């Protein structure tokens, strides 16, 4: 489902080239869940952004569902990303002026209108335990509740790939456990391929494939 071959990434900075990823290979089946841990600054977010087609590799190949997204035009790429990839960031990134329901529906604004996304949004709101908060605005929610809305938004289009960058990093222990439970539940119910970057060994312990990013290399640790 997801395949990286000989992927490298370096940034050109005023101080010279900054090499972050060197000849990384990774292959994940549909429905597989992988966690990536590693020191701050090792390039975990950069790798996740490349998987999410938000950042381009310097060399190497990325295949998602057999497609090299970097061969697509900008317009095709935006549609591909919207259809196939869900994102959950450390900061929920909700639209402050939109309600819970509107936030969850926001990725469907450019989707074909044949699906009943409203029904699906209502079901997701129930699954993440926010039925009573449907018309609330982000400023009226706790950090954990906002992240649960962000998870429902990430799942609205049933992405084949869900990418999470430190999804529990800003949360207290109890909220983090609740988001981790919901993430596990969504993964089991829907079968998206899941990649989670995290500093939390508690979160990583819930998923089967574990990787470590260190010194530009990605190594499987289980
Ligand atoms: N666009 C960029 N240009 C130059 N350097 C960058 C850019 N994006 C990230 N970096 C640098 O790359 C390094 C790795 O960043 P990041 O992928 O965010 O690491 P991590 O998520 O593991 O903490 C950091 O030193 C960061 O400053
Ligand atoms: Mg990061």
Image (cartoon, grey):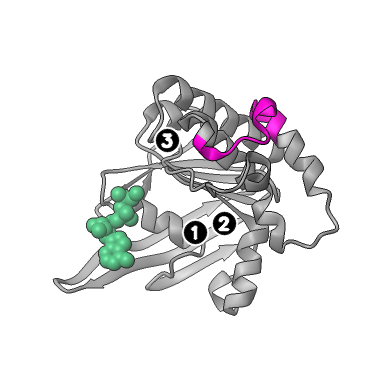
Residue contact between numbered discs 2 and 1, judged by CB atoms under 8 Å: yes
Looking at the image, tell me whether mark 3 or mark 1 is earlier in sequence order: 1
Q: Is mark 3 within 8 Å of ligand 1?
A: no
Report crowding for label 2: few under 14, some 14 to 19, many 20 or more residues within 10 A (C-alpha): some
Q: Which mark is residue 2?
A: 2
Element carrying mark 3: loop
Name the residue at 42% across, 35% down: 222
Q: In the rendered image, which quarter is residue 101 located in?
A: top right
How far is the residue under mark 3 from the one under mark 1?
A: 22 Å
Nearer the observer, 34 or 172: 172
The magenta stretch spans residue 138: yes
In the rendered image, the vertical position of residue 11 relative to residue 96, given as above or below: below
Name the residue at 64% across, 60% down: 82
Residue 127 location in percent, x, y? 69, 29
Residue 39 location in percent, x, y? 26, 44
In the rendered image, the vertical position of residue 7 relative to residue 188, given as above or below: below
State ligand 1's quadrant.
bottom left
Looking at the image, tell me whether mark 2 or mark 3 is earlier in sequence order: 2
In the rendered image, the vertical position of residue 221 relative to residue 108, given as above or below: above
Report crowding for label 1: few under 14, some 14 to 19, many 20 or more residues within 10 A (C-alpha): many
Question: What residue is shown with label 3?
Answer: 222
Name the residue at 46% across, 46% down: 89
Q: In the rendered view, does 183 fall on the left or right side of 54?
A: right
Residue contact between numbered discs 3 and 1, judged by CB atoms under 8 Å: no
- Mark 2 or 1: the one toward you: 1
Q: For the magenta stretch, what is the residue range?
A: 125-139
The magenta stretch spans residue 160: no
Residue 91 location in percent, x, y? 43, 44
- Mark 2 or 3: the one toward you: 2
Question: What residue is shown with label 1?
Answer: 51
């Amino acid at each position: 489902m997801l395949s990286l071959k000989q992927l490298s990434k370096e940034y050109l900075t005023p101080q010279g080239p900054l090499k972050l990823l060197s000849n990384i290979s990774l292959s994940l089946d549909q429905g597989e869940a992988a966690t990536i841990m590693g020191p701050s600054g090792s390039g975990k977010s950069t790798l996740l952004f490349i998987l999410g087609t938000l950042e381009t590799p310097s060399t190497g190949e990325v295949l998602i569902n057999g497609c090299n997204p970097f061969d697509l035009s900008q317009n095709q790429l935006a549609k591909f990303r919207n259809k196939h990839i869900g994102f959950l960031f450390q900061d929920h990134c909700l639209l402050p002026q939109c309600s819970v329901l509107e936030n969850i529906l926001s990725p469907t604004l450019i989707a074909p209108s044949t699906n009943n996304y409203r029904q699906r949004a209502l079901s997701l709101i129930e699954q993440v335990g926010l039925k009573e908060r449907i018309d609330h605005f982000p400023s009226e929610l706790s950090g954990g509740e906002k992240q649960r809305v962000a998870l429902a938004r990430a799942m609205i289009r049933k992405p084949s790939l869900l990418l999470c960058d430190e999804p529990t990093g800003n949360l207290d222990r109890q909220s983090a456990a609740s988001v981790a439970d919901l993430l596990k539940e969504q993964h089991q119910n829907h079968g998206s391929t899941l990649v989670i970057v995290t500093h939390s060994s508690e979160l990583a312990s819930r998923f089967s494939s574990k990787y470590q990013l260190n010194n530009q290399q990605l190594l499987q640790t289980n």
